[in-house]
Amino acid sequence: MIGAETTLDVSISGHPSQTVQTITETHTRTETPTVGYKSVTTAGVTFQWMVVDSGTNLDCILTATATGWVAVGFHSNTATASGKGFFANIIIGYVDLTGTSVSVVDNYNDSGNGHGPDTSFTGADDIITYSGTEINGITELRFKIPLNSGDPYDLPLVVGDYYNILLAWDADDDTTKRHDERGVVPNTQL
Ligand code: HEM
């Protein structure tokens, strides 16, 4: 009920009817398109995700106040922070300066100090769909990935299990450049 007003009229014998109570109810809807998504934030990057397609895929939204690349990394929960994402599955992307061209690429960290497309190893790019916007200096990437692609360069994700989520961004679109900011959200339940 939105903006409903209830008025109670009470009449006592011999007295004129009087209004003794007025209740106003206002229920505001706050739903956004991301209701139902889980969310973590660190280093100025927010990662939101929801399991979709009968438990087979992960719908993801990655947002940062950044005009360059933004990335999420999935790492086993037992990986130490000093591992710098070594062997992490990374999804990295950007919207170009004109705001028209979007790139989101399935990467793998093979060195601890960098990463490359899965396709540059012997893997595949397993991103199912992607899109992105860059508005007022905020980059938002949206993509869908399989929970378990079967690719040795992706980390199989199990709903309910715990992972280290790595988040990073850079002011430059060049994905071979190191981050301006980076962080880890450990023990994150998918
Ligand atoms: C070319 C790209 C990259 C290079 C050269 C690079 C290099 C480095 C280096 C040298 C460090 C250690 C120094 C420091 O703490 O800043 C580091 C740490 C880190 N990087 Fe990267 N990185 C790259 C991309 C990424 C990406 C895409 C992510 C995440 C999605 C990421 C996440 C992290 C995290 C979470 C740490 C801190 C780990 C810790 O606490 O020990 N990096 N990176």
Image (cartoon, rainbow, N blue to C red):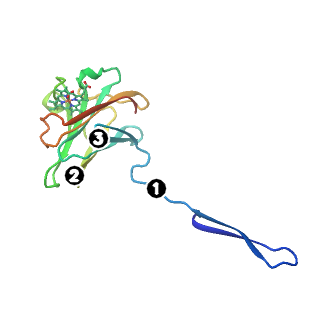
Give the residue displayed 16% in from the left and 28% down from the top. Answer: 114
Q: In the displayed structure, would residue 22 be above or below residue 138? A: below
The residue identified by callout 3 is: 45
Q: In the displayed structure, would residue 78 be above or below residue 23? A: above
The residue identified by callout 1 is: 30
**In what quadrant does ligand 1 lie?**
top left
Q: CA distance from mark 3 to mark 1?
A: 23 Å
Tag 3, which secondary structure? Answer: strand
Q: Position of residue 150 (x, y in %)?
A: 28, 29
Q: Crowdedness of circle 3 by 10 Å Cα count: few (<14), some, many (20+)?
A: many
Query: With 85 as the anchor, is 158 left or right in this view?
Result: right
Query: With 165 as the anchor, is 30 left or right in this view?
Result: right
Give the residue displayed 18% in from the left and 35% down from the top. Answer: 179
The residue identified by callout 2 is: 137
Q: CA distance from mark 2 to mark 1?
A: 25 Å
Q: State whether residue 11 appears in this view.
A: yes
The quarter holding residue 158 reads: top left
Q: In the displayed structure, would residue 172 be above or below residue 80? A: below
The three-letter amino acid code for the residue at tag 3 is Val
Q: Position of residue 50 (x, y in %)?
A: 39, 42
The three-letter amino acid code for the residue at tag 2 is Gly
The three-letter amino acid code for the residue at tag 1 is Thr
